Amino acid sequence: MQTLRTSDERFAHLRDAGGTDGFDYEPHHAEVADPTGGGPIRMAWVEDGPADGPVVLLLHGEPSWSYLYRSMIPPLAAAGLRVVAPDLVGFGRSDKPVEVADHTYARHVEWVRELVLDRLGLDAITLVGQDWGGLIGLRLAAENPARFARLVAANTGLPTGDVDMPEIWHRFRRAVQESPRLDIARFVESGCVRGLSPVARSAYDAPFPDETFTAGPRAMPGLVPYRPDDPASAANRAAWAVLAASTIPMLVAFSDSDPITGGMRPVLERTVPGAAGRTHPVIANAGHFLQEDAGAELADAVATFIRTSG
C-alpha cells in the first residue's frame, strides 16, 4: 500500500491563527499495520486534559479531521476529562493511502481499534462519534464492549443496507465520486448552518495538497452500507445485536438540521437499552457538522452526560 504524508507546513498557519478557529495542538503519532503487508501507517491524534482523567474519544467523519472538535476539546479538558481526538487514516495529519480501493470499512475499524486499544491502551472510554466517527466507533464499541463506558452518537448511525440511505446522501456520494476535483472545504461548509470562516475553510483543505491525497474522502461515501448485501452489512447487523442487548449508557445528541442522519436518531433511542429513560438533546440551529455549528453546546451535553451517568 502506497501512502502519502501531508507536510506539517500545511497546518502551521492554524497554530498562529488564534481565536475560535486556531488549532495549536501538536499531534502525537503512532503506527498501525498495513493489511497489505507493506510498511506501517502513521496515525495522528491530539490530546488534552489530565492524563488520569476519564477518557473521551472524539471520532470525526468524512471529509473532516480532528480540527472539527477544536471548540469542544478545551471545555471537555477543563471538566477534568482526558480528551483524545485521532485523525482517521486518509485524513488530517494521518498518512493517506493513495488508492480508493485501499479503504474499506473493516480496515478503518481495525486501524482505529489498533490505535485506541493497542497503542494507546485506552479503557473506560466515552465515545463521541459523528458521521463516520459513529459508523466506526459504534462498531468498535460493539466488538469491544468491555473497553467502553459510555456512547455518544452525534449525527451518525450504523447502517446495514436493509433500509436505503436518503436521496440527499446518494447525491453527495455521486458528487464525491464523480467530481474531477474535490473542494473539501465546500463539502464541509455545505453541512453547516452557520457557515465557515476563511481560516476554517483553509483548515479543512490543508490535509489535501492535491488530488493524489484525496483517496480517503473519495472512498468513504461508497463504503457506507446502503444495500443489504454490502460487505459490511453482516458485521453491522452483528454490532446492532450487541448494542440492542447492551446496558452501556448512550446519549443521542443530534442536531435539528441534518437531512442525512436525522432518521437514525429515533432508531438509536428506541433500540439501545442504554438510551432509555434519558433526555436526549436536539441541538438547535446546527447542521450535519454540529461540532462546527454548536461545539460548545455539544461539549456541555457530553460533559453533563459523563457527570450524571456514573
Image: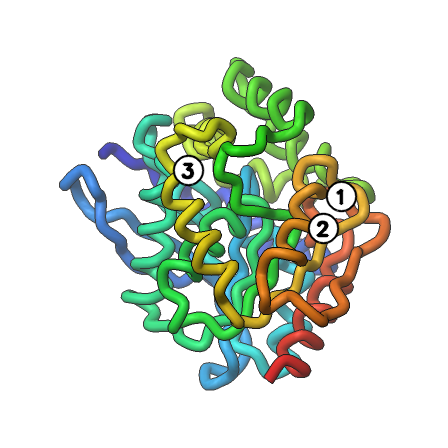
Tell me where residue 203 sits by quadrant: top right
Q: Secondary structure at mark 1?
A: loop
Query: Quick one: label 3 or label 1, which is nearer the N terminus?
Result: 3
The answer to whether marks 2 and 1 mark residues whose Cβ atoms lie closer than 8 Å is yes
Residue tagged 1: 287
Q: Secondary structure at mark 2?
A: helix
Q: Position of residue 20 (x, y in %)?
A: 73, 58
* Left-right relation of 126 to 111: right
Q: Amino acid at mark 1?
A: Gly
Q: Amino acid at mark 2?
A: Leu
Q: Amino acid at mark 3?
A: Ser
Tell me where residue 189 sits by quadrant: top right
Q: Is residue 60 above or below residue 96?
A: below
Residue tagged 2: 290
Query: Quick one: label 3 or label 2, which is nearer the N terminus?
Result: 3
Q: Position of residue 98 (x, y in %)?
A: 33, 29
Q: CA distance from mark 3 to mark 1?
A: 27 Å
Which residue is at 60% across, 30% downward? 165
Q: Is residue 275 visible?
A: yes
